[in-house]
Image: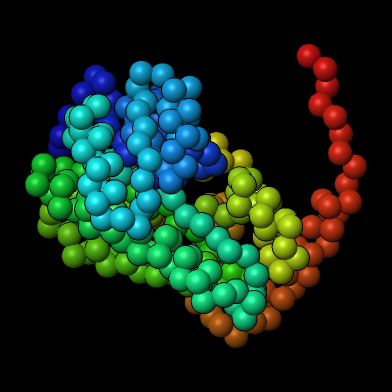
């Protein structure tokens, strides 16, 4: 087994300007790793890296671009050395029912969430195999198991990503790489704010949402423990993973969850805003 240096590992994180990616970068650095933050928002990701200090660096790039992926790995190598761990976290969503989204909106979701991640995995496969070690962590979604109204194409990309991830892991079973896929539930990021504004996405509020720092713990823990797959919450996530196999069951259960989400969303929208206490 390869020994980890006293400088920790070199981790490349996508979608790191905010949300889960930013939380992953911060926690990884706190645990002694070095992190290359990447994001399509150049100003935000550079600012985030500056906040995190000398064990962080940043570069801007679009995960849909193969050339951009190569530049990200090269930037990480120039700053810290070869990339030990890739955390594929970047993703987008256009909310709304499938019939209401434009063809371009459907295409955007597929190109970023699925094809962009596939491009990153393939780039990492080549580079990490050549260096003789590496760990690919794909941050997916619990929607990889559940057909949710208001998320049809988004769910499709996550179903596809899970199948791609495990297929590649099996293909590479005799190679030097490790593979982990992590499925967060509803997470309190800018994406959830977007969903709050769209009543078609009310099902997001049917269950408890999690802080991005909670998801980051699972991601950074996985750098060391290298689990095959992680679901959230641990027990309920396992139940949902099994239940999602049965479409007739989903057609009965999901509408009830959606109704609960609508009620909860209305409560959140009408709840009085409490000013934070003075410091």
The residue lying at 53 percent from left, 39 percent from top is 18
Task: Tell me: 152 left or right of 125.
Answer: right
Residue 220, x across and y down, in percent: 40, 37
The residue lying at 52 percent from left, 52 percent from top is 184
Task: Tell me: 191 left or right of 42.
Answer: right
Q: Is residue 121 visible?
A: no
Quarter of the picture containing the N terminus is top left
Q: Residue 224 sits in which quadrant?
A: top left
The residue lying at 79 percent from left, 57 percent from top is 265
Task: Tell me: 96 left or right of 4.
Answer: right
Foreground of the two, 136 or 44: 44
Residue 197, x across and y down, in percent: 74, 57
Q: Is residue 223 above or below residue 7?
A: below
The residue lying at 60 percent from left, 85 percent from top is 248
Q: Is residue 75 above or below residue 252?
A: above
Q: Is residue 31 above or below residue 22?
A: above
Residue 122, x across and y down, in percent: 23, 57
Q: How is the image coloured?
A: rainbow
């Amino acid at each position: 087994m390869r020994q980890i240096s006293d400088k920790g590992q070199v981790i490349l994180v996508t979608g790191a300007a905010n949300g889960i990616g930013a939380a992953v970068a911060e926690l990884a650095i706190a645990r002694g790793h070095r992190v290359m933050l990447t994001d399509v928002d150049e100003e935000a990701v550079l600012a985030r890296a500056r906040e995190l200090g000398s064990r962080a660096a940043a570069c801007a790039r679009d995960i849909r671009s193969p050339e951009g992926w190569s530049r990200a790995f090269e930037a990480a190598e120039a700053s810290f050395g070869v990339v030990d761990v890739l955390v594929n976290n970047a993703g987008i969503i256009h909310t709304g029912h499938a019939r209401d989204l434009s063809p371009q909106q459907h295409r955007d979701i597929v190109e970023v969430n699925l094809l962009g991640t596939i491009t990153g995995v393939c780039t990492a496969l080549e580079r990490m195999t050549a260096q003789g070690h590496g760990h690919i962590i794909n941050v997916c979604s619990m929607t990889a198991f559940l057909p949710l109204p208001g998320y049809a194409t988004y769910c499709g990309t996550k179903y596809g990503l899970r199948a791609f991830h495990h297929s590649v892991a099996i293909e590479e079973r005799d190679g030097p790489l490790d593979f982990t896929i992590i499925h967060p539930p509803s997470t309190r990021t800018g994406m959830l704010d977007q969903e709050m504004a769209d009543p078609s996405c009310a099902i997001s509020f049917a269950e408890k949402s999690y802080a991005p720092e909670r998801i980051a713990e699972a991601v950074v823990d996985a750098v060391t423990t290298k689990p095959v797959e992680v679901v959230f919450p641990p027990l309920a996530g396992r139940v949902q993973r099994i239940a999602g196999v049965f479409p007739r069951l989903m057609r009965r259960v999901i509408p009830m969850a959606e109704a609960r989400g609508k009620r909860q969303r209305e409560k959140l929208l009408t709840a009085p805003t409490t000013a934070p206490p003075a410091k």
